[in-house]
Every structure is written in structure tokens, then in C-alpha cells.
Amino acid sequence: MTEMNASQDELFRWADQIPPAAWTDLHNRSPQQATEAVGAAWDGESFKVPLLGIEYSVNPGKQQIQTADKSKPRVDYQTGIVLLTTLSMSKGVPPSGRMTVPQELAGGRMFFTGAHAVPNKQLAKYVEKNPDKLLDRALGIGGEMIEGADIAFRVPGLPYVPLYVLYWRGDQESPSRAVIGIDDRALFHLDLAGVFGLTNILVFRFCRGA
């Protein structure tokens, strides 16, 4: 599966710009196997996959990715790559319910640096000014409150890949802080580039709206 990287982010913005070669692994997998592994649905033509509260339609024959109701805006490139990656490689392993941070996944310490840094700072900066909006958006996509910080919740990233957000308010001695977590079995469903993409989608949705 083609990885997302800085050069791709510069060249592409939309899912309909994904290179045909990126669809190869999905074409080589049976729809039944992909559907069961991801926790998706198959209607004979397209996969229906929920991602952070929005259902997407992925049509391998037409190499087309849209929102399922087709009334929402054009699907962005990172969302398209995350959906293709999980449909192509997911092993169908259920979530453990144990949170980790992306850096603690195998290979994560070297991967999540520089241009691939998890967008915790961007999220903290937004939440500091809009804590109520954060909660409203989390609950609006099926999230649930958990313990662990001043504000903490779990949201359904992909069907088998829950995401976590923990936020601590700042004071005179220390700035506010946010941590994005993920189920510790995430690499059964995504590669590291896909995990990075999923965290970016989360922050974009919460900071700028769906």
C-alpha cells in the first residue's frame, strides 16, 4: 500500500487523486475477507466503512471514495488512504481496550517525529479556547467520556480502532497539554502512516469541523 508522506501531501488534496497503484492490494483481496476484517459492509459494489462518525463508500471497481450519502464535501486524500489501507491490510483483530500513544507502537518512536509528529500541540491549542466544542463533537460522533485527565474521552476512529483524547488545562506554571491515544492493537489494521493519517483526521474534524 502506498504510504502518505510529505511530498504526497503537497501534491494531492483529494481522494480522487489517489494513484491507481494504491488500489492494487485491495483488488487482490476478496470483498468478504476485507469486510469481515475491517468491520465494514459490502453491497456487492462498494464497501461501507465508518470513520470518525462519517460513513464512507469505497468502490474498488470505479476506484472511487465518497461519503455514503454523497451529499457531503469531496473526500480528502488522507481519509482516502486510511480507508484503502485498512481495507487492504486489516487482520480483523478486535480492539484490546488498552490505550497507547502512537509513539509506543512498534517502530513508532522513529516514525512519529518531524513532519510525522502526532498533532498533540495543535489539538491542545484549539481545546484551550474551545473545550465545550471539543466535547460536543466527540459525543456527536459516538464518543464516551473516560477518566484520566481534565477532559478525556474515547471515540470510534475505525470500527476496530478506537482513538482517545486526553486534555489537561494549563496554569501559570505549565501550559495546557493534549495527548492523542490509540488502541494498542492498531497495527493489525493500519500501518504507521495510516495511524498518522487517522490522528490528523481527528484533529482536523475537531478543530475545523467535519
Image (spheres, rainbow, N blue to C red):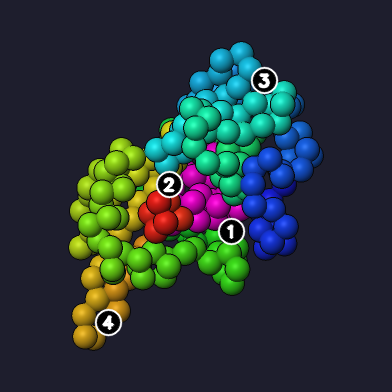
The residue under label 4 is 174
| Quarter of the picture holding the N terminus | top right
Query: Mark 2 or 4 closer to N-term?
Result: 4
- Report the residue at 20% width, 53% height from top: 147
Does 145 appear in magenta?
Answer: no
Label 4 vs label 1, nearer the camera: 4
| Amino acid type, label 3 | Ser
Task: Give the Cα separation between the discs numbered 3 and 4.
Answer: 52 Å
Which residue is denoted by mark 3 in the rendering?
A: 30
Mark 1 lies on residue = 107
How far apart are the alpha carbons under marks 4 and 1? Answer: 30 Å
Residue at the image point whose x is 59% and y is 58% from the top:
107
Q: Is residue 62 above or below residue 156?
A: above
Residue 29 horizontal/vertical position (percent): 69, 25
Task: Say which residue label 2 marks.
Answer: 210
Horizontal arrangement in the rendering, residue 109 relative to residue 137 (left or right): right
* Residue 80, image x, y percentages: 61, 41
Q: Position of residue 181 (x, y in %)?
A: 39, 55
In the visual, does 115 lie left or right of 155? right
